[in-house]
Structures are given as C-alpha cells and as structure tokens.
Amino acid sequence: MPDTPALPVIRARGLTKRYGPQRVVDDVSFELTAGETLVLLGPSGCGKTTVLKMLNRLVEPDAGTVEINGQDVRRQRPEELRRGLGYVIQQVGLLPHYSVADNVAVVPRLLGHAPAAIEARTHELLTRLHLPPDEYAGRLPHELSGGQQQRVGLARALAADPPIVLLDEPFGALDPVVRAGIRRDFRELPELRGKTVVLVTHDVAEAFELADRILLLDAGRVQQLGTPRELLLKPANDFVRRFFAAERLALQLRTLTLADVQPFLPTAPPLPALARFHLDTPVQTALEQLTAADPVAAAVGPLMHAFHHALQAASA
Amino acid sequence: MNLLSELLDFWQLQAGKLAEQTLQHIGLTAAAVLLAVALGVPLGLWLTRRPRWAPLVLGVAGALQTVPSIALLGFLIPWLGIGAAPAIVALLLYSLLPIIRNTVTGIRGVSPAVVEAARGLGLTDGQVLRRVELPLALPVLMAGIRTAAVIGVGVATLAAYVAAGGLGEFIFGGIALNNPVMILAGALPAAALALAFDGALAAVQRLSLRRLPRVGAGLLVLLPLLGALYLLPGAVGRLRAGFSPEFVGRADGLPGLQRAYGLRRLPSVVLAPALVYEAARAADVDVIDGYSTDGRIRAYGLRVLRDDRRVFPPYYAAPVLRPALLRAHPELGPVLNLLSGQLTDSAMTELNYRVDYLHQEPRAVAEAWLRARGLWRAPRPVVAGAATVRLGSKIFGEQYILAEMYAALIRGNTDLQVQTKTGLGGTTICFEALRSGAIDMYPEYTGTGLQVLLQPPPAVLDSLGGRPAAVFEYVQREFGRRYGLQWLPPLGFNNTYALLMRRQQARQLGISSLSELGAYLGR
C-alpha cells in the first residue's frame, strides 16, 4: 500500500538540552525511515553532535523523546541500546591496547557471537575496507595511519551488522585526498546498503554527497529539514540561504541533473554529445566529461543556458 | 676496606637478627602497600567520578605526607599502642598520596575519545573501567605504587621506634652508639630492599596486558603472604622484652647480659628510649632496660632486677672538682663529704620521681631530704666579700637535685657564696667547663668518667672487671694524673643500666635478680 508511510525507524520529538542557561538543543524533531540517510548539518556548536548522542543515550535530553523502532530508548538499558547501533566518531577512539582485529570484534564479543563467526566477519570487513587482515589484523592502532584508523573505526561500527549506524564527523580529521577516498568507499560499501544512517558533519559538500535528507541546525534550532535540493533551491530562511552561499554554484551544478535541464535544451539542432549520458547524471559531471574530451565542446553553451533556466524553474 | 670487613663481620655475627629484621621489613612494607592499594585505588577512582572532591582528598593526603614520620608515630601510639599496628598505619598514610594521585592522573590521562567510543559501542561502566580505563591508566598507576613502595621501605625503618622491628633496629642502634658499621648494617639492606621492591614492581608493569590479570591475582596472594612474614618471628617465650636501640647494640648491654645470664629465650622488640617505660607499664612488654634510679621506676610500679653477676659497669655518682677549690677553702672538704655514701638507689629513685613526675622543685626536694637526714642547716647570713663556689650539673633531674643539695650544704655550713650553673648539656660540656675553670665542681658517674672521658684500652677495662671500688680508684687516679681533677668519695647510689619488670609480675614469678630471670626463662 503505497499510501501508508513506512513506520519510522527513528523518531525524535521535541529534543531539548540545556547546559546552564544555554539551550544547546532546542525542540528538535525528525523521523527516519528504514534505509534512509539523514545528515545533521550546521556550523560548529550548533548542537548537531548533541542531537546524535541523544539517539544512543550518551546524552540524555532534558525534554523530548527518542523512539527507535517504536520503542522509547529510555526503556532499554543504555549498553544494550548502543550494542544495536553502530557508532563512529571523529577521533576514532580505537582502544589503543587492542589489536585491529580485537577492536573490530568488541561489539560481537559483547553480544556473545561465536568466535569463528566473529573471526570470519572481521576478516571480511577488513578486506572490504582495504586493510588486508594478514597484514593489519594483528597491528595496534598507533601503527596505522589516520585514514586506516578511521577505516578500522568504521569496520568496528559495522561488525555486528547493526540496522542503524550513527556517525559523528567520521571523515573530519582526515586530509582531503584520504577523505574523498574513504567517503567513496563508505558510499559504495555493501554493508551500508539498506542501513539507516545518521551522519553529523559541518562539510556541505559531504552532506550533499551522502544525504537523502539534511537537517540544518543553527544555535540548537532546526533551520530546515529536507532533501539537499530543497535546502538549496527553496531555502526556508536567510540562514539557510547564507549557509550555502559560498558554494552555491558548485552545489547547484551537482544537484541538478540532465533530467532537470532537458526541458530547456534546444531541440534543434540536437546535441548528440549529451546523448551518451544517463538522465541521472549531475550537470557538473556532464560538463566535466564534455570538457575533458574537448575543452571548447559545442554542447557546453547550450547546456549552461538550459541549466540557468532549469534553476529558475526549480527555485520558483 | 676496614669498614667493609667490619660490616661483614657484623652481619656474620648478627646473621639471625639480620634475617629476622629483613623479613619484618619486607612484611611491614608489603602489608602497608597492599592496604594502601586497596584503599587508595578505589578512592582515586571515586575521585575521577567526583572531581569536586579531588582537591580536598588530595590535600589531606598531601598534608599527611608532610607530617614528620616520628610525629605521626607519636600521634598514633595513644590509639594503637606499640607494635605493628601504628607502624603499618603510618606507612599506609605515607603510601596513600602517590597511589591516589597517580590513580587520578592515570585515569584522567585516558583519552576521552577512547572512553566515549567504548561507551558508544555498548560497554557498561564497569567494563569501561576494567577493560579500558584501568589497563590504559596502569603505567601511571603502577608508577604510583612503586613510589609508595620505595617510600614505604624508607619509612619502615622507623618501625624500630615502636617495637615493630625491621632494619631500623640496626640503624637506630648504630646512631645511638655512634657506630657507623651498625648503621650501614641496617641501611644497606634497606636500600637494597627499596631497589628490589621497585624492580619487582617494574617487572610486573612490563608484563603484557593479557598476562596482567593473572599476575595481579598472584600479587594479591603474594603480598599478604609477605605481610605475614612479619608474624613469623613471633613472640615464643615466657616473657617479652622491649629494649632501647642503644642497649641492644652496646657490648655491655644486651649481648653481655645474654652471655652472663643465658637470657637466650627472651624474645625482644626494639623501642624508642622514650617509649620503653610506657610499654612496660602498659604490659606490652614484660622486661625493659632502663636506668636504675629513674623516677619512672617508682611512678610506674617497676622494679630493678639485681645485677648479681655485675655485668653492667658501675656508674656511681661522686663529685668531681678542681683541687684548687679545696686548697683555697679547706673547710669545704668535710661539708661536701657529708653526702658521701648517704644516697641509696631507692632513695635517689624516690627523689627523681618527685622531680620528674610530681614536678616538685629540685631545691625543695633537696631541702626536704636533707631535713629528713638531719643534714639541713639554715643558710648563713651573707658575708661581704665572701668567695663564690660555682656548681655545675648536667641537664636532667637527678643532677639538679644533687647540685641543690651541695648548694644548701655549702650555704648552711660555710660562709661561702654559691652559684649554680645547672643544665650544662651533656658530659663533655660539664667536663670541659670544669677543666677550663668555668665551674668548680659537678656530680659525675664513675662509669661515665671511665668509658666516655678516659676511654682506657680494653685490657684495662677487663682488669677492672666492673668492680665498683676498682673503677672508682682507677678513675680517681687517672683524673688526677691526666687532668689535675679530683674525685671525692661516691654518694652511694649506682645509676647504671638495669633490667626492669613490673613489680607485681616480678613478685608473682619470684624474680628479683637477673640470675632468677635467667633461671625462669630457662625452665
């Protein structure tokens, strides 16, 4: 029945947290359906990490509730709740006295999984994350690079195959090249397919790349909750508009697809250069590939023209 | 080289004692460190959860650290008596600060990200503590325990002051006797023990984390066993003795006594001299060493055991003076000799008791005794231009009393004026004052004159054989020959070393002399 919305996997209502007189989180509500990726976005100190920690009870709200699969999280012991939620933090926080394999195995062991199954799972995850177990399983965290540590952190969060994964700036501490690589691995990781993900970041590009929906926060309050396209093209207020101002063009080129610009392309003469692209392709990708083959490709002008009109139509 | 061979000789001679003291030392330190860990680590952990209390608790532990150890023992004795209890408690208090502080520092040093990640993964608070915080804080925590152990070995030497044994017995005995060999005999093993403790704990620290729980459990078993070492050389005997360090060490003290009377089955502890009498009074020990005319003998109901084989050297009191004094004032000789042979041991003990324990004036005590003996004469009126006799005394009650007696006799029987210079510190100060003419006379003891001032070769000492008359004659002759000073006849009492028991117990057991004590112990 397509009409009935799927039962939300996570439902947060009216979350509020005060530290002293200051409300660091003020009446935040959202819902996630299964398999959806929500990005909590905002400037430093906006309360996004606090909201994330309320989901696994590392922070208890002063007001509001969190339900996971319809059950109030406060009715569960915090440890048990957390064992069912993957968790990755920016500082990684690998246990420095545990080997890579032991770090990955922490949660499955807490859950009492069979040793053989744990070993197989660890092996599989490390392989998938480009950390060949033969070489890396026995190493200690301080023997790894920052990017490798973050991969182990990711493997650790996924080891027990939790349906929900919480990530707090998981790529924040890495240099841009490493970061792009891990992000790509992350996006393409089969283990993450179908998982419900909440990810905290202050990086707009990252949010647009990974999010199904974005929750933009400022000073503890929700500024806008919606798809990347909605936030970009139909900002709810000045804050949202200003927040994307610096990267607006790049985001627009990445967000609009050929499907969006197609109605505004000239039909005659036709542009055979564009025919090889799928309609899902972002305008940016199409431009990059066109100019890579021929810096002065004839299709660029009409494409930009159509992009301009599509933008006007979408923002109306 | 000479020192080394003397040291080796000493150890060989005292091998049994050395082993016993070393075991006691290990036992005391291990017990105290164990208790300090049991108390300090949980306290430190609690402080990491309640940081507001940290300054207060660390401040108190730090303040305890600054209390001088002797003073701390002094505070503890009224509560805990003597023996192992106050020693272990004092050691425990000194060990607490490094353990608490390093626990707090170690746990605080664990990266918050690691702790947060661990909690976020679903470890319970207890699991975070056991699997993450404690293992990661362990190097710092162990450093604290090592510091505590090394401090403990050092402070445990003071246990010898409260009858808790340990290597301090040699050290304090050596200090009391000014015997560097004996000091080293205790100090070197103590230093070695400190290094051994530190090394052993360092080895534990180097173990891999996986093996640590097992080794930790082993330590938990081992430390109480080490602590129990302390109890091994326990008191097996019919009586228990408490001796001052000096008495245990010097040749004419305990060793001579054991040879002469066969007191071999008398288990003994070593105590600070100030505590010996108290310990006997409180029945912590049964036999103590002391001085035969000490006022506390009367005050605490003790009795002197007769030295029937004359092991202790005679310390008969007699006036020593400049011969010029008698040449200038010939009338003084008979007056000073009025006291000759008049004071028995028990009479002097009684007088000392009045001054030291009833806090009566030495002058009033002296006058009352002179009246009772019919020797008192009211002071003669002052004669203009009369010469002045300057009387000296050492700085304790008995000497004050004697000086006041002589002063009263001189004032009552001659026209001379008297100036008393009491409280001239120790033997050497009095003696030098007399030689230089700063004073004209002071009361001295024959044994002191012999052993401290004349210091004759051993052959001479042997020939004198501890006979009071022979010692007096030798001292009198040699002082005249060497220093031009004169001894008058002794007053009668002998203020020498003595073994003391509680009067009631001595009566019950039928012990009045050292031979009887030896016989009783040998039965």
Image (cartoon, grey):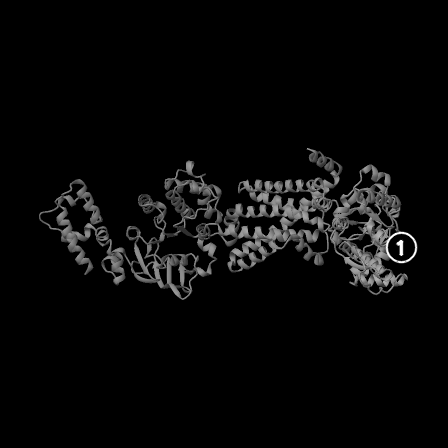
Amino acid at pointer 1: Pro
Q: Quadrant of residue A131?
A: top left
Q: Residue furthest bottom?
A: A21
Q: Residue at x 36, y 49 (%)?
A: A170
> Which chain's residue wears label 1?
B
Is B409 left or right of B244, judged from the image as shown? Answer: right
Q: Quadrant of residue B384?
A: bottom right
Q: Residue furthest right?
A: B374
Q: Residue furthest front?
A: B385
Is A118 left or right of B359, judged from the image as shown? Answer: left
Instruction: Kindly tell me whether residue B94 is visible in this rendering.
Output: yes
Residue A221 spot, x, y in % from top left? 33, 63
Instruction: Kindly tell me whether residue B287 is visible in this rendering.
Output: no
Q: Secondary structure at mark 1?
A: helix
| Viewer-proximal residue among B358 and B505 | B358
The crowding category of the residue bearing disc 1, from other C-alpha atoms within 10 Å (few below 14, some 14 to 19, many at least 20), is few
Above or below — where is A93 with respect to B13?
Answer: below
Above or below — where is A142 with respect to B491?
Answer: above
Residue wearing tag 1: B334
Is A267 left or right of B75, judged from the image as shown? Answer: left
Residue A265 spot, x, y in % from top left? 13, 51
Q: Residue furthest left?
A: A268
Q: Quadrant of residue A43?
A: bottom left
Residue B76 spot, x, y in % from top left? 68, 56
